[in-house]
Image (cartoon, rainbow, N blue to C red):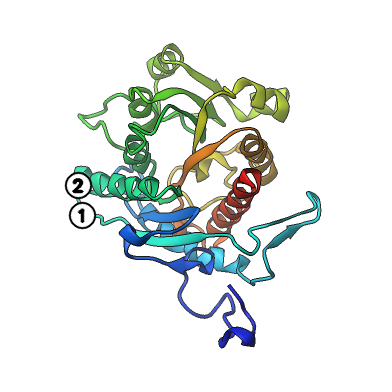
Amino acid sequence: MAHGYESGRLNLPFTGIATFGKYDYQPDWDRLEADVAILGAPFDFGTQWRPGARFGPRAIREASTLFSFGHAGAYDHEDGVTYLGPGTRIVDMGDADIVHTDTEQSHANIEAGVRAILSRGALPVVLGGDHSINIPCVRAFAGQGPIHIVQIDAHLDFVDERHGVRHGHGNPMRRAAEQDHVTGLTQLGIRNVSSTAREGYEDAARMGSDILSVRQMRALGTEAVLARIPADVDIYLTIDIDGFDPSIAPGTGTPSHGGFLYYEVLELLAALAKRQRIVGMDLVEVAPAYDHTDTTAILAAQLLLNLIGRILHARG
């Protein structure tokens, strides 16, 4: 990722093709060679109110170029560590095929993309899309060993069925809890008027969920929250951008005030990455049309790049 004339081209952030972080593009999934693979899932048929998250992957990729100056990695003076340095192998695979109005086929195509990443030994990082794209992402881990899901979100997303719909963006955590390879869920940031009725909360608790609001997490502190997450199992992260406060993340379909600030999430997830293996993640519900400043997409890109850097550093 040289950005000087020694590479033959001056590849500044605002030039060229906006792959994620301006890392290499590999459209041939059978030839994937990477530590981390980025897959877009531009699907928003599962939304119940404001659409637009289908443009999330494109917006996050565009925003990620802000951090692609190529300074031989990203030096963090607080940690004394250079993250994403030379030798970092991140590849952008492009997007899963989305068939308009066909949820099942679109979800199947997303699952196939995640399975392709796992088959090559890479860490899947999926850019949504609405939160229903988590359903095929979690399905793809069947046969990969047990996983525990850590969710950052304003909403519980534990609806079983509504109007006959079982695979919308209010259902993913219920569908995850039903999977044999999912050992449990830690659901963080859940607050205020929710998409899930009381019986959904009761079902979640009965099925093994640990649910904390933003206020409860602040009262406990990062270390106490971390101690509640099982340390003896691999972690899958699902991050809904509406888990953050809409003052810093307005570009989403279902904003909810009283949300997280940036470092509250990064510090918890960085500590988690240092403690145990994170085997996959998705970041969902960025809907750029509702944020003319691009702040929401920039937040998503910044969080992902910092988190990926910390995961790779922890792996050595």
Give me the disc on residue 105.
2
Residue 110 point in image, percent of width and height: 30, 48
Alpha carbon separation for disc pair 1 and 2: 7 Å
Residue 195 point in image, percent of width and height: 41, 30
Whether label 1 touches label 2, CB < 8 Å = yes
- The front one of 102 and 196 is 102
Q: Amino acid at mark 1?
A: Val
Q: Answer yes or no: is residue 147 visible.
A: yes
Residue 46 point in image, percent of width and height: 30, 42
Q: Residues within 10 Å of mark 2 (few under 14, many from 20)?
A: some
In this rendering, position of residue 294 left or right of residue 225: left
Q: Considering only order in the chain, which callout, 2 or 1, is on the residue closer to the N terminus? A: 1
Residue at the image point whose x is 65% and y is 43% from the top? 314
Residue 243 point in image, percent of width and height: 54, 39
In this rendering, position of residue 48 left or right of residue 225: left
- The front one of 223 and 113 is 113
Please tell me whether mark 1 sits on a helix, a strand or a loop.
Answer: loop
Residue at the image point whose x is 66% and y is 22% from the top? 227
The quadrant in which the N terminus is found is bottom right
Q: Amino acid at mark 2?
A: Gln
Give me the disc on residue 99.
1
Q: Quadrant of residue 147?
A: top left
Residue 189 vertical position relative to residue 81 in the rendered view, above or below:
above
Q: Answer yes or no: is residue 221 visible.
A: no
